[in-house]
Image (tube, rainbow, N blue to C red):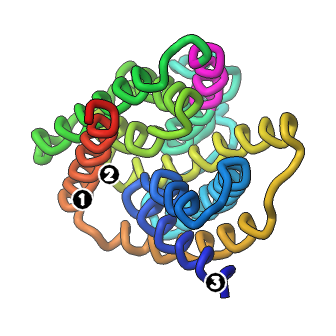
Amino acid sequence: MEYALYAALAFVCEYVDSTIGMGYGTTLTPLLLIMGFQPLQIVPAVLFSEFITGILAGVCHHRVGNVSFDFRRDEKIRRHRLQALGYIPRSFDAKVTYLLIVLGIIGALGAVFFSINVPKEVVKAYIGAMIFSIGLYIIVNIKRNKVFRWRKFVLIAALSGFNKGISGGGYGPLVTGGQVISGRSAKNSIGSTSLAEGLVCLAGFITYLILKRGIYWHLALPLVLGAALSTPLAAITVKKMPETKLKLMIGVITLFLGAWTLKTVFL
């Protein structure tokens, strides 16, 4: 019975995450703490389930047409901003996701060294202010159709990984909201975020296994099962939802998460 409860919680949290591009770990982790699990049991289980369901969500979003992933090497492009990475995937959505993954992992690793000397409250305040600002920007510019800018997007991608590494959170709201303010559609942003976060979580999970060499499978398996079942439903929901409404939801929830983070710091 308890396994069914864990799976149900994961189902709801992942449905929200795969629908608006944020909220799985942010919601599920505190719930599991309240239920009596220890952080060392929760963190690897959540990372592992996010890895599996991130991949599945990305595939589902691709299948229903929210994004178009083609990760075969693009041999036709001779000059591109990603050329320095040595490999460029074919489709635009794949290019964006690839950059999110690479910079996300680099940012997360760099944040580990930075976090040693910075007080946690300062980190929380920084992330809260950034997420709040992005949410506010999305709402204010809800009806504007912006042109995608690679420079703005690269900054967002790097900061998202940094946030994930330094605090364990702040990835989904910043990546999804950041893509929207960079000029991408909400549906494309959600699809790319799901896949990118899954692979960034894989890097975190592997690092955890190297350091701790263990995972609490009694929690991890029901989380994976429940979360995985929600991904097709979430992809269909995104497909059918109007773009403006989806942007508004992303803006409002991002604004709320930023405000809530600031509240925990200053109150």
Crowd tier of the residue under label 1, counting other residues whose Cα lies within 10 Å: few below 14, some 14–19, many 20 or above: some
> Hey, what amino acid is under mark 2?
Ala
Task: Determine if residue 168 is in view.
Answer: yes
> Hey, what amino acid is under mark 3?
Ala
For residue 239, what is the image quadrant? bottom left
Sequence order check, earlier mark of 3 and 1: 3
Task: For marks 3 and 2, give the one nearer the viewer.
Answer: 3
User: In the drawing, does residue 235 fall left or right of residue 141?
Assistant: right
Q: Secondary structure at mark 2?
A: helix
Image coordinates for residue 155, horizontal then vertical, percent: 42, 21
Residue situated in front as seen by the camera: 15 or 196:
15
Disc 3 target residue: 4
Disc 1 target residue: 243
Q: What is the spatial separation of the Cα atoms under label 3 and label 2, in whole angstroms?
A: 32 Å
Task: Give the main secondary structure of the magenta stretch.
Answer: helix
Q: What is the spatial separation of the Cα atoms under label 3 and label 1, in whole angstroms?
A: 34 Å
Disc 2 target residue: 186
Disc number at residue 30?
A: none
Residue 127, compared with residue 10, is above or below; it is above
Sequence order check, earlier mark of 3 and 2: 3
